[in-house]
Image (cartoon, rainbow, N blue to C red):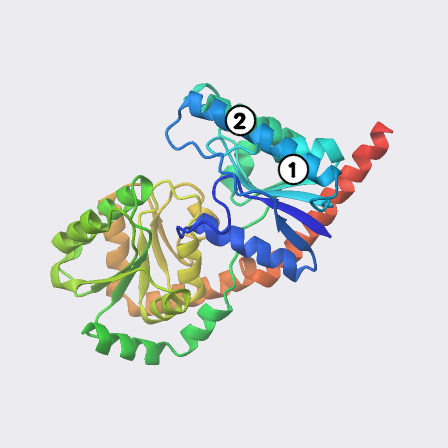
Amino acid sequence: MDVAFYAPLKPPDHPVPSGDRTMARALLALLSECGHRPITVSRFRSFDRAGDPARQERLARLGASLAERLARRISTGLSPRPALWLTYHLYHKAPDHLGPRVVERFDLPYLVIEASCARRQADGPWALGHAASLRALARADLLLAMSERDRSGLLEAGLPEDAVRLFPPFLDAAPLRAAAIVRPRHRAALARALALDPAVPWILVVAMMRPGAKRRSYALSARALSLLTDRPWALLVAGDGPLRPAVEAELAAACGPRLRLLGRCAPEDLAVLYAACDFFFWPAVEEAYGMALLEAQAAGLPVVAGREGGVDAVVADGKTGFLVRPRDAGALAAAARLLLDAPELRARLGRAAAARVAREHDRPVARTRLEAAIAEACGRRARARSAAA
């Protein structure tokens, strides 16, 4: 079937890499794999970073105009009429102003993936975006939350429990598994290329260097790692962005000659990095769940992270890594010290991490879940039509 696909936060072809863009692209690929034809119906971003009511009003008006234009194109045959509308990542900072209008006009099934709702935003600077998101969520036939935190938020907002499902984040783990199989070769090559001692533990960080939560996570990483100078280790950092000079200077001050800065890496190079390192480290400030945390575990790396946002949806504390108190540099350092001192623990948690990703987060599992969700959304819409007839 033709599936209208819309990502109000960031379109799949946005030039700046992010976990959100990665997941949007993965969903498009998954739809095709399921035999559907995904159609990206708009690149319109409804995102308001600052909480500006005037901007939210302008975005709502523009969204309504774009929805009307799309509806006219569908009505006149200039655009294909979809059999289902799928919105990815709808929340108060990036509401869906298009989907509810178009699905109402054509009585289409409406599926939202990575749906979330925070009641505390109802009266804050994003009140208009929150209200628009809630209206869209209420119209959706099925809501897929990617973490238990998001699922609970939807239920607290009064959305019906029978319309809410968990849909864990996913990835294609095959390239990461393949890289992990030849870990010794990758480690030896990186040791030569980066002048690293393969006998000491290598800690890996993969994240964009941009303002906001990522910047705060990097600052917290530097503070935590500065507490570990009594142990041998090296830090490999893959990332780029507008704050790269400041972030790199802060890490260099904390880590000294232990630091290796790699900049932005292609996916195939990242797979090699994950496979060659010993564990992944990230404070996860305001992290929705963290695609890099999933990628690391798929390659067999245990994780040290802050227990924030939906991180516990992808990391099993004590089983695939360690989750510590949010934004606590000392707790992060203590967890990292455990892994630095125990290679057998790293290996055991890494094996469990790879197995858990294969079992719960790999693309074949997600494909089955998505097929079931599409069928359920279509079935719910058909029953609603019958009840209204």
> Tag 2's secondary structure?
helix
**Image-based side of 178 in relation to 194, left or right:** right
- Circle 1 — which element? helix
Which residue is disc 1 drawn over? 70
State which quadrant residue 145 falls in. top right
Q: Amino acid at mark 2?
A: Ala
Crowding at mark 2 (Cα within 10 Å: few <14, some 14-19, many 20+): many
CA gap, disc 1 and disc 2 = 15 Å
Q: Position of residue 253 (x, y in %)?
A: 12, 52
Q: Nearer the viewer, residue 198 or 57?
A: 57
Task: Indicate left or right for 41 with 276 as reference.
Answer: right
Above or below for 65 versus 368: above
* 259, above or below 374, in the image: below
Residue at the image point whose x is 37% and y is 44% from the top: 307
Q: Is residue 135 above or below residue 321?
A: above
Name the kind of residue labelled 1 in the image.
Leu
Residue 227 location (% of width, % of height): 16, 52
Give the residue at mark 2.
Answer: 60
Could you tell which of marks 1 and 2 lies nearer the N-terminus? Answer: 2
Q: Across the whole image, how many numbered discs are drawn on residues?
A: 2
Badge nearest the viewer, 1 or 2: 1
* Residue 363 appears in view: yes
**Residue in the image at 53% along x and 29% along y:** 62
102 to 341, vertically: above or below: above
